[in-house]
Amino acid sequence: MSTSPDPTLDLQKLQFEVMQQLEVIADDIKAGRLGADEGSAKAKAIIAASEQQRVAMFNAALSVTQRQRRRGWLLALAAVAAIAVVLAGLLLARIGTV
């Protein structure tokens, strides 16, 4: 869903597009090309669709954040395990020389 590396930019783009669409609807109502009820229904549909897109963007960003957090913990665990192996090796080498 995301088109840029920054979810904030995607959200701003979505908000801008929604505002443009709502302005077109308002202009059409003022010009008499669209009735108030029909314009209201279109506006509500646009807002509902944008809400679904925002939720999808939020869920995607949350998923990425959770993946990054898990990777961070796995790297920390791997570092601790590597240090433990080195220390165990040094301890065994020291025991062997005593």
Image (spheres, rainbow, N blue to C red):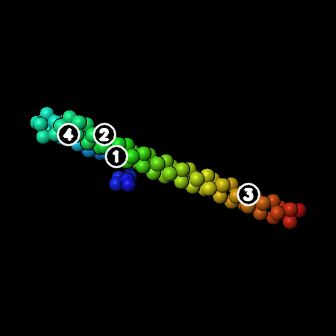
Between the residue at mark 1 and the residue at mark 4, the CA separation in whole angstroms equals: 15 Å
Tell me the amino acid under the disc marked 1. Ala
Tell me the amino acid under the disc marked 4. Ile
Residue 58 position (above or below residue 95)? above
State left or right for residue 65 relative to residue 29.
Answer: right
Tag 3's secondary structure? helix
Q: Name the residue under label 1.
A: 49
Tag 4's secondary structure? helix
Q: How many C-alpha atoms fall within 10 Å of the one at disc 1: few (<14), some, or many (≥20)?
A: few
Residue 95's x, y, as percent? 86, 62
Q: Which residue is farthest left? A: 31
Q: Residue 13 is drawn in which quadrant?
A: top left
State left or right for residue 45 relative to residue 72.
Answer: left
Q: How many C-alpha atoms fall within 10 Å of the one at disc 2: few (<14), some, or many (≥20)?
A: few
Q: Quadrant of the N terminus?
A: bottom left
State left or right for residue 22 relative to residue 98.
Answer: left
**If you read the primary sequence from the N terminus, does the residue marked by circle 3 or circle 1 appear first?**
1
Q: Name the residue under label 2.
A: 44
Residue 81: which disc?
none
Q: Name the residue under label 4.
A: 25
Q: Name the residue under label 3.
A: 84
Tell me the amino acid under the disc marked 3. Ala
Residue 6's x, y, as percent? 38, 48
**If you read the primary sequence from the N terminus, does the residue marked by circle 1 or circle 4 appear first?**
4
